[in-house]
Image (cartoon, helix red, strand yellow):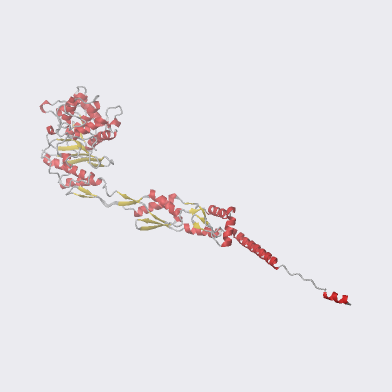
Amino acid sequence: MATSGLTGLGTRKKTRSLPIIPIFSWLLILMAIGLFALQLVNFSQQNNQLAGDVTVGGVDVGGLSPDEARTRWEQAYAQPIVLWYNDSPILLDPAAVGFRTNQESMLAAARSASQNESTFWSRFAAFLTGRITAQTIDVNLSAGYQERLLQDFLADVAARYDRSPGEAQFDLDTLSIRPGAVGYALDVERAIPLIDAALKDPTERQVVLPLKGTNGGRPDISALRDLIVAYLDSEGFVYDGQNSVASVYIMDLETGAEVNLLSDVAVSAASTVKISILLDYFRNLLFAPSDDEAFLMAQSLLCSNNSSSNLIMQLIGNNDLFTGIADVTTNMQYVGARNSYISAPLYLGGDQVLGSIAAPLTSPNASFRTGADPYNQTTTEDLGSMLGMIYDCAMYGSGLMTAYRDGEYTQQECRQMLNLMSANDLGRLLQAGIPAGVPIAHKNGWLEDVHGDAGIVFAPNGRNYIVAAFVWENGEFFSFERAWPLIEGISRAAWNYFVPEQPLIAARTDIPEQAVACDAFSPPYGEVDLDNINSWRDSGASISWPPL
């Protein structure tokens, strides 16, 4: 009986508790994996979209579909370019110059950048955290346009907006020229790269067009011609009349620009032919000039001594005067003075040497007759041509040295010719139209009905120029009181054109009434230094050639 009770007390039912924490942990892990997989699927589903850190040609297309990206950059590059011409805006439609982007090439590059495996997980991490990666990927712009269309567009802009300079105005009271207003023109060459850059920039779509000023500060040399014509008219001298002629040749030795006012009309050369005689004498010299030869040149050119000039031509002809005359003429013609010649000895009064050679064929302006000396004539254009040949030889080793390539002329000889002519200090004609002390290498000549002078002015601003002027009047006597001021006015007008910063606004009052006699400026025998023509003077005055 006792056994039965113990058995009942010892019987119990066993129970087990659930593993809640491990289960919960696994659930969280599964949920995380599922969420990760879901986000990964979502991210992968966006594979057709571009990465959020991609730009194309500077345009942000991150996160857009290819079509959306294409639309965005096309809109950016389709915006017009604003071109500023001074204060005027001009719109340039990119399509007008054929601007096109290479869509397929840029889209492929953008996709490639978006799908780059090396950035997949970093971009996925940014996707999960909502962060934007610090490094963006920029696909370069691939585009083009038709340069010819752009040039045509700019040509049209230039035609509509360019402004020519205002016409120069002259003042007869001062014989000076006032420049017109400065013009301006589109600098197409500089504008093209600026517009090219703007077409290929999605944000900077404005260009200030580069302009270049057109010459308003330096009037065209035609203004000088107009001034000279007006000046002669104001003086009552008809430059193109039947009974009066003014022949003027001016050349800008910097630019080559010329004034030709009946410069091809034949006139009596008078003593200006001695430039040609000097030119040919130097060509025939085999050695440096002796004292006798140098003095002979000075007498011929500075004192206009006809006997010395004839003797030089006789020496050129190996003691045959007419052979020498022919040689001088041949040399004139060879260096370009095609309407100039001498065919007889220069006048010696009672000791005149008679005879002549045949004159060469010439073709001066046949519309004007000045009764030119049939044995000795020239044109201002020819005189200017010869002076130009000497100048180029002296300054640049060209000119005469180029015309004669066998050493007939040297640069030193050309400088000696200019040095000698610079001593022609008679104080009137061309010299009276420039300030005192300005170097001018020139030779004058006159007869009863014609007066002239031709030379090279060495301006202090470096704008050296040639000027040759003759005035002729048909009548019993054309006085120097009437003729010389006309040439001096022409010279002053030329000076004011080339050296406007130091104008002669009034005729000089310090000039002599008549030409200074040559014994005041021609060196005596034994003291003719062709390299320093004024060294004989007590002052030791000299001019460095070429003048600095």
Q: Which quadrant of the figure has residue 331?
A: top left
Q: Nearer the viewer, residue 17 or 151?
A: 17
Q: Please identify the residue farthest to the right as the structure is shown.
A: 1
**377 displayed left or right of 50:** left
Q: Is residue 247 visible?
A: yes
Quadrant, the C terminus: top left
Residue 101 position in % (x across, y down)? 50, 54
Q: Residue at x 55, y 54 (%)?
A: 110
Q: Which quadrant of the figure has residue 346?
A: top left
Q: Does 102 sit above or below residue 426?
A: below
Q: Please identify the residue farthest to the front as the structure is shown.
A: 2
**476 displayed left or right of 338:** left
Q: What number of labels is visible?
A: 0
Q: Which quadrant of the figure has residue 481?
A: top left
**321 displayed left or right of 155:** left
Q: Nearer the viewer, residue 20 or 124?
A: 20
Q: Does 224 sit above or below residue 531?
A: below
Residue 35 position in % (x across, y down)? 64, 64
Residue 379 position in % (x across, y down)? 21, 36
**159 displayed left or right of 531:** right
Q: Is residue 471 visible?
A: no
Quadrant, the N terminus: bottom right
Residue 28 position in % (x across, y down)? 66, 65
